Every structure is written in structure tokens, then in C-alpha cells.
């Protein structure tokens, strides 16, 4: 087995995440599981800043491969199960990276693999994570009924019964699905369930790093999406401002996405100058990294709305020139 270090950062340098050992020992144990999980934390920190990209996906798949290789060595059944769980989490991370980069076919294949490994590891948290990602993938493909079904599947996982924090995210994701289907009442009802569940959750309980993005700020950002989709653009703008006031700085990609949603809410109110000014902030936020595919797509939506509403406006032409320049940036 290739015992390589597997995290490649945005600068192209290689950081050691899993400490290699010389001469594979006959058994693996808790320390191996801990080392592997620390690698997941490092990958999620990179995702928070830069978003999904090919090197992150490769690193996550290498982590899954390492976990499965150790699982085949002599170990207790408990450790074998935990290694399946770790492999599932790494594979779900790779799937998420592909999804954020809008590589839908690859994301779907990896999500199926992650769900299988989560079952082998008896890990309801990864199962919930996978269904959450399935909902987002369905949305990218315009399969909004399937997005709702995936959100509902996330709600039925065992972890949502034990921890209302996870239940809140599942309800919020379902609300987004309902809003894209134009079901106003169902969307608002799901948002209410999400808020109620978050109010019951302990925010101090230890949880995996992949869900660290979620909380009141992110729920407010998702509320902005729902409100804009159901035609409440003024409320969407207010929710976006509120979200941006509280999304932590380290979640740079999520702040850029929330800023894009703010620009969309503004242009849907025909506030062309302000919308273009807001949308330009995204290029500054992501200045030292390529713009992930999911964000590019959202900016494309903004540009289409812009040229539909104000095709001859000077500010629209200027923003379009900037957009095309940034789109071509590697």
C-alpha cells in the first residue's frame, strides 16, 4: 500500500495529515482512527476557505483508501466498524467536493459509495450527511421533487432523532427543496421546524467538523434562499444581511455564497446598481482562489437576471466584463 501523505493545500504544498509508519503493524487500533479523523478536520478547514476542488477530492479519496486498507488488517470488530465509518466520511467529503465543483456525475457515484460505507460502519451521522448532499445534488440537476425526498430521508436518519441540531439542517434543506417547487406553505413550514429544532439543540455538544458551518447564521442564509424563491425578495435581502453579519470569517466560501444570494435578492427588486455592487464583492472575497463551480453557477444566474432586467445599463455591461474576466481565471 502507498503510505503517502494525502493532503494537498491550495498553494500546492503538501501537509502531513496522517502520520505514516514504517512496517505495517499486524493490528490497528484507536490511535489510527484518531489520526485519520484529524485528517478529515484539515480537509474541511480547506473546504471552508476555498470550496470544492480536485486536489481536495483526491486527498479525501486517499484518506478513504487508507482507512479501508487499515480495516483489512487484523483488528477488533469495533475498530473495523469505526474504520468503515471514517472511510464513509472521507468518501462523503470527496463527494461534497465534487458537488461544490458541480461535477454531478462524479458526486452521485461517490455519494452512493459513501452511503454503502456508512451502512457498513453503522454511522447515522454520515448517512444524514449523504442525504443532505443528495438533496443539494438533486437541486443542481433541477430535480426538485427528488431534492425534497432526499431532505425527508435525511430527517428519518437515527441521528436526527437523537440530536435536534442535525434535524434542523434536514428540515432547512427540505425547505429549500419545497421553495424550488414553488410550494410556499410547505417551505415556510419546514423553515419553522428547522428553527424550532435549532432552538432545542445544545450548541456545545461535540460534532464532526463537516457540520461546523451550520447554526443560526447558516439557517438565516438558507432562509434567504427560500424567501427569494417564493417571491419574498425584500425578506430575502433582510435575511441575507442578517446572515452575513454573523457567518464566521473562516467560512469564506459560505460568506461569498451568501453575498451572491444578497445580490440576487437585490436584483429581483430591480435595484440594479446596488445588486452589481454587492455581486462585485464576491470577486474580492475569492480573490486568491479559483471560484468553485457551484458559486460560478450562481453568479451565472445573477448575470442572466441582470442582462434580462437591464441589458443596456452601463453598470450591467461593466459587471459583465468583470464577470467574464473572473470566469476565465484559473
Image (cartoon, rainbow, N blue to C red):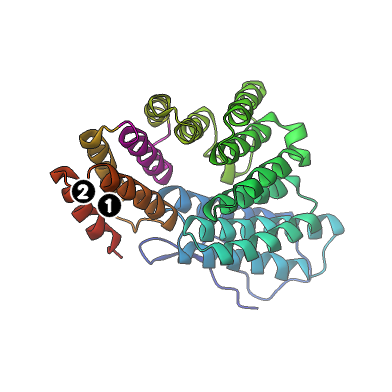
Q: Nearer the viewer, residue 280 or 227?
A: 227
Query: Mark 2 Cα within 10 Å, few/some/many (few <14, many 20+)?
Result: some
Q: Is residue 77 left or right of residue 35?
A: right
Which residue appears at 23% of the width and 33% of the height? 274
Question: Is label 2 in a helix, a strand or a loop?
Answer: helix
Q: Nearer the viewer, residue 14 or 91?
A: 91
| Extent of the magenta region | 247-269
Question: Is label 1 in a helix, a strand or a loop?
Answer: loop
**Which residue is identified by label 2?**
319
Q: Is residue 175 left or right of residue 225?
A: right
Residue 250 within the magenta-colored segment of the rendering = yes
Q: In the orientation shown, which residue stands out farthest toward the right?
A: 77
Q: In the orientation shown, which residue stands out farthest toward the left?
A: 314
Placement of the N terminus among the 4 image quadrants = bottom right
Q: Quadrant of residue 12?
A: bottom left
Q: Nearer the viewer, residue 261 or 315?
A: 315
The correct choice, above or below, for 327 with respect to 246 in the image is below
**Residue 188 percent across, percent down from the top left:** 58, 26
**Residue 29 percent across, percent down from the top left:** 76, 58
The correct choice, above or below, for 310 with respect to 223 in the image is below
Residue 291 within the magenta-colored segment of the rendering = no
Total marks in image? 2
**Which residue is identified by label 1?**
287
Which residue appears at 83% of the width and 54% of the height? 78
Label of residue 52 in the image: none
Q: Are marks 2 and 1 in contact (CB under 8 Å)?
A: no
Amino acid at each position: 500500500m502507498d503510505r503517502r501523505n494525502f493532503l494537498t493545500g491550495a498553494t500546492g504544498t503538501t501537509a502531513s495529515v496522517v502520520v505514516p509508519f514504517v512496517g505495517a503493524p499486524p493490528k490497528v487500533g484507536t490511535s489510527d482512527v484518531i489520526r485519520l479523523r484529524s485528517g478529515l478536520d484539515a480537509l474541511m478547514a480547506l473546504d471552508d476557505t476555498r470550496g470544492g476542488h480536485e486536489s481536495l477530492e483526491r486527498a479525501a479519496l486517499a484518506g478513504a483508501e487508507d482507512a479501508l486498507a487499515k480495516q483489512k488488517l487484523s483488528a477488533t470488530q469495533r475498530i473495523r466498524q469505526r474504520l468503515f465509518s471514517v472511510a464513509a466520511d472521507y468518501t462523503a467529503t470527496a463527494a461534497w467536493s465534487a458537488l461544490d465543483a458541480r461535477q454531478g456525475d462524479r458526486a452521485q457515484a461517490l455519494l452512493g459509495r459513501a452511503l454503502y460505507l456508512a451502512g457498513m460502519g453503522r454511522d447515522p451521522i454520515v448517512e444524514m450527511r449523504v442525504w443532505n448532499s443528495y438533496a443539494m445534488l438533486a437541486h443542481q440537476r433541477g430535480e426538485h421533487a427528488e431534492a425534497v425526498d432526499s431532505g425527508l430521508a435525511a430527517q428519518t436518519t437515527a441521528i436526527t432523532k437523537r440530536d435536534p441540531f442535525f434535524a434542523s439542517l434536514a428540515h432547512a434543506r427540505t425547505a429549500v427543496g419545497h421553495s424550488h417547487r414553488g410550494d410556499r406553505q410547505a417551505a415556510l413550514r419546514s423553515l419553522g421546524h428547522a428553527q424550532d429544532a435549532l432552538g432545542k439543540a445544545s450548541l456545545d455538544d461535540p460534532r464532526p467538523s463537516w457540520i461546523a458551518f451550520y447554526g443560526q447564521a447558516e439557517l438565516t442564509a438558507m432562509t434567504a434562499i427560500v424567501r427569494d424563491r417564493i417571491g419574498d425578495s425584500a425578506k430575502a435581502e433582510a435575511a441575507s444581511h442578517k446572515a452575513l453579519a454573523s457567518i464566521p470569517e473562516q467560512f469564506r466560501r459560505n460568506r461569498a455564497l451568501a453575498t451572491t444570494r444578497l445580490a440576487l435578492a437585490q436584483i429581483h427588486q430591480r435595484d440594479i446598481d446596488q445588486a452589481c455592487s454587492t455581486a462585485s464583492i464576491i470577486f474580492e472575497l475569492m480573490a486568491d482562489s479559483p471560484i468553485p463551480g457551484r458559486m460560478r453557477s450562481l453568479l451565472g444566474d445573477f448575470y442572466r437576471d441582470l442582462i434580462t432586467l437591464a441589458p443596456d445599463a452601463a453598470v450591467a455591461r461593466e459587471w459583465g466584463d468583470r464577470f467574464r474576466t473572473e470566469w476565465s481565471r484559473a
